[in-house]
Amino acid sequence: MEPDATAHEIEELVRPHLTGLAYARVDYVIHEGSPLLMELEATEPDLFLALAPEAAAALIDHVRERVVMAER
């Protein structure tokens, strides 16, 4: 699924507040013509990696990079 224009606008709004996270999910609905935040998840016990195996490698790379940065 490709994000629509509204999803991209929401991403621009929340991204500055989620720096350093490997994962975040924003759930919203359109209510009376405007996006309404339903849930902002900054942790997820099940990242659905079985559905997108390439995402596991990206997550590993991100965690590795954060560990290296922390060791400096």
Image (cartoon, rainbow, N blue to C red):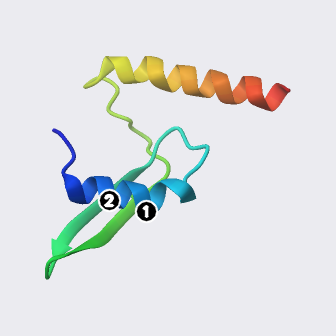
Q: Quadrant of residue 50?
A: top left
Secondary element at tag 2:
helix
Measured along the vertical axis of the image, is residue 71 above or below residue 13?
above
**Residue under pointer 2:** 9
Q: Quadrant of residue 46?
A: top left
Q: Quadrant of the C terminus?
A: top right
Please, which residue is most extreme toward the bottom here?
32
Q: Helix or strand or loop: what does disc 1 sit on?
A: helix
Horizontal side of 17 relative to 25 (left or right) equals right
Q: Name above or below for residue 71 compared with residue 42.
A: above
Left or right, residue 10 beside residue 44: left
The circle on residue 51 is none
* Image position of 62 with respect to 53: above or below: below
Which amino acid does the dot numbered 2 rest on?
Glu
- Which residue is painted at 36% across and 64% down in the image? 39
Tell me where residue 40 appears, x and y as whole percent: 41, 61
Are the residues at dot 2 and dot 1 in contact (C-beta closer than 8 Å)?
A: yes
Residue on which the image places disc 1: 13
Q: Position of residue 67 (x, y in %)?
A: 72, 26
> Which class describes the residues within 10 Å of circle 1: few (<14), some (14-19), or many (20+)?
few
Q: What amino acid does circle 1 point to? A: Leu
